[in-house]
Image (cartoon, rainbow, N blue to C red):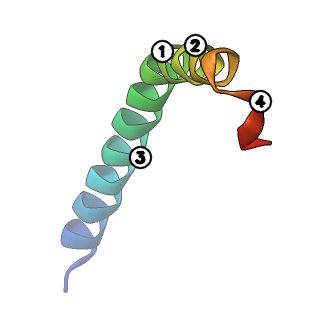
Amino acid sequence: MSALEVGSMISLLGLLVFATHEEILAVAPAVASALEQFLASAPVALW
């Protein structure tokens, strides 16, 4: 494997991690509010 190939793979991995991180940041508030609503409406018997 050449240094160029290794560099390309590292760049792709970096982009992938960055994209995933951005997705998580975008989705997290929606998931948090949905979870809050579920916990608020869940019967106390669950606890």
Which residue is at a point 26% across and 64% down the rendered structure image? 9
Front residue (pair 8, 22): 22
Judging by the rendered image, the residue that carries numbered circle 3 is 17
Residue 33's place in the image compared with 16, above or below, is: above
Q: Secondary structure at mark 3?
A: helix
Which residue is at a point 32% across and 42% down the rendered structure image? 15
Q: Secondary structure at mark 4?
A: helix
**Residue type for callout 2:** Ser
Residue 3's place in the image compared with 1, above or below, is: above
Residue 33 - label:
2
Mark 4 or mark 1, which is nearer the start of the sequence? 1
Given contact means CB atoms under 8 Å apart, are the residues at marks 1 and 2 in contact?
yes
- Disc 2/disc 3 C-alpha distance (Å): 25 Å
Front residue (pair 24, 8): 24
Residue 42: horizontal and vertical position, in percent?
A: 63, 26
Q: Nearer the viewer, mark 3 or mark 1?
A: 1
Q: Nearer the viewer, mark 1 or mark 4?
A: 4
Judging by the rendered image, the residue that carries numbered circle 4 is 44
Judging by the rendered image, the residue that carries numbered circle 1 is 30
Mark 2 or mark 4, which is nearer the start of the sequence? 2
Given contact means CB atoms under 8 Å apart, are the residues at marks 3 and 1 in contact?
no
Residue 39: horizontal and vertical position, in percent?
A: 67, 24
- Disc 3/disc 4 C-alpha distance (Å): 39 Å
Local crowd size for mark 1, using a 10 Å CA cut-off: few (<14), some (14–19), many (≥20): few
**Residue type for callout 3:** Val
Front residue (pair 18, 34): 34
> Along the horizontal axis of the image, is 43 left or right of 8?
right
Mark 1 or mark 3, which is nearer the start of the sequence? 3
- Disc 4/disc 2 C-alpha distance (Å): 19 Å
Q: Which part of the image, by quadrant, shows the C terminus?
A: top right
